[in-house]
Image (cartoon, rainbow, N blue to C red):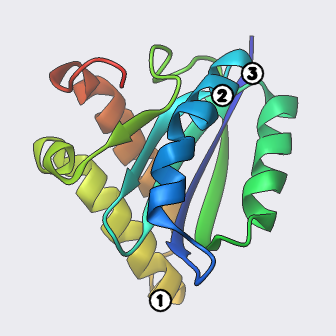
Amino acid sequence: MAYSSYAYLSKPTSLFNLDEFIDQLSRYTLNNKKRGITGFLAYDQRRFFQYVEGEREVLEELERSLRTDKRHEILVHTNYRSGEKKFDNWSMKVLSISDLTIVVPENQLIDLLSFSYQHGHLINDWEQEAWTLIDQIAKSKKMLLTDR
């Protein structure tokens, strides 16, 4: 089966409420699991990075929903098609700041996307570099705790 992947960096808007977001996380995770969507989400109080993967049609629907969600503004995003899932056991792993210090490629990825948003004209191949970093994260995921 062919899978698609979608990754984005966003910043919260004035409509974002952290307490409400935390309360809804288990619902989001369950919905993703039902739809066969896997991946991870990182939030550092200033920005979100999310990587999701699944069947193309399902992911396109999720992407439309994410792009119209008024609680955040997507700064930069990229899509990729692949033959396999990288995070097949993570219905939606939420990575904390301490997790991010363990998996250094995630910090590099967030920095790359932030830089490409601000100075995209300086990086010709930022999307390929982003997918390389996601591959590194997938390889190092065994170091992280089980699905939360």
Image point (54%, 56%), residue name: 20
Q: Is residue 55 left or right of residue 14?
A: right
Q: Check disc 2 and report the residue beneath it.
A: 32
Of residue 29 and residue 49, the one placed in the foreground of this image is: 29
Precedes in sequence: disc 3 or disc 1: 3
Distance of label 2 from label 3 (alpha carbons): 5 Å
Q: Check disc 3 and report the residue beneath it.
A: 35
Distance of label 3 from label 1 (alpha carbons): 34 Å
Dot 3 amino acid type? Arg
Q: Do the numbered discs 3 and 1 sit on residues whose CB atoms are within 8 Å?
A: no
Dot 1 amino acid type? Gln
Q: Check disc 1 and report the residue beneath it.
A: 118
Of residue 47 and residue 53, the one placed in the foreground of this image is: 47
Precedes in sequence: disc 2 or disc 1: 2
Mark 3 closeness class: few <14, some 14–19, many ≥20 residues within 10 Å: some
Residue 110, placed above or below residue 82: below
